[in-house]
Structures are given as structure tokens and as C-alpha cells.
Image (tube, rainbow, N blue to C red):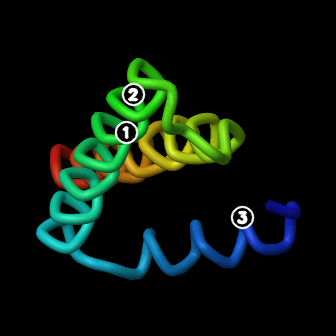
């Protein structure tokens, strides 16, 4: 992904509610599991997708943490 796309996506994440982000995180974790399973069985075609998913999980967790910290203040 390009930096502009990532920034746009982060803006969308920050604008969304925590429930939506939690659902997105669960979906990404499920995809990560499936990609790991495909890799283990030798069926993974696009190995770069693993890196993208891992980074999207990190971004989602970061936004969730930011929202949690704002609630505390």
C-alpha cells in the first residue's frame, strides 16, 4: 500500500466506532490464521498478503488503543 492509501484508511478507522474496529480486527485475525494454514500446507500463492494483514492488525490495534486512552481522559 502507498502512504496516501494508508493515511486514508487510518482516517476511516479513526472515524469509525470501536465495535466496527473490533469486528475488523476479528476478521483480520481470521484471515491471518487462514494464510498461515495455507503457508503450512504449501498452498499460499501471495506471500506478501501475510505482511499486509499483519500490519493492518497492528494499525487496527493502535487505533483501538488510541480510542481507549481518549476515553480515560
Q: Secondary structure at mark 3?
A: helix
> Which residue of the protein is positioned furthest toward the left in this rendering?
19
Q: Are marks 2 and 3 in contact (CB under 8 Å)?
A: no
Residue 44: image x %, image y %? Answer: 54, 38
Please tell me whether residue 22 is drawn above or below residue 15 in the rendered image.
above
58 or 17, which lies in front?
58
Please tell me whether residue 14 is drawn above or below residue 16 in the rendered image.
above
User: Distance from label 2 to label 3 (Cα)?
Assistant: 24 Å
Q: Secondary structure at mark 2?
A: helix
Pointer 2 residue: 36
Residue at coordinates 60% horizontally, 73% vertically from top-left? Answer: 9
Pointer 3 residue: 6
Q: Residues within 10 Å of mark 2 (few under 14, many from 20)?
A: some
Of the residues under marks 2 and 3, which one precedes in the sequence?
3
Q: Nearer the viewer, mark 3 or mark 1?
A: 1
Pointer 1 residue: 32
Of the residues under marks 3 and 1, which one precedes in the sequence?
3
Q: Secondary structure at mark 1?
A: helix
Residue at coordinates 42% horizontally, 43% vertically from top-left? Answer: 57
> Which residue of the protein is positioned furthest toward the front in this rendering?
42
Residue at coordinates 33% horizontally, 79% vertically from top-left? Answer: 16
49 or 5, which lies in front?
49
Q: Are marks 2 and 1 in contact (CB under 8 Å)?
A: yes
> Which residue of the protein is positioned furthest toward the top in this rendering?
40
Q: Is residue 69 left or right of residue 54?
A: left
The circle drawn on residue 12 is none
User: Distance from label 3 to label 1 (Cα)?
Assistant: 19 Å
Residue 22: image x %, image y %? Answer: 18, 58
Q: Nearer the viewer, mark 2 or mark 1?
A: 2
Please tell me whether residue 9 is drawn above or below residue 31 in the rendered image.
below
Amino acid at each position: 500500500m502507498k502512504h496516501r492509501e494508508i493515511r486514508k484508511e487510518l482516517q476511516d478507522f479513526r472515524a469509525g466506532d470501536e465495535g466496527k474496529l473490533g469486528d475488523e480486527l476479528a476478521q483480520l485475525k481470521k484471515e491471518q490464521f487462514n494464510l498461515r494454514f495455507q503457508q503450512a500446507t504449501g498452498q499460499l500463492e501471495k506471500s506478501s498478503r501475510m505482511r499486509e494483514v499483519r500490519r493492518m492488525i497492528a494499525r487496527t490495534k493502535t487505533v483501538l488503543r488510541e480510542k481507549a486512552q481518549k476515553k480515560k481522559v
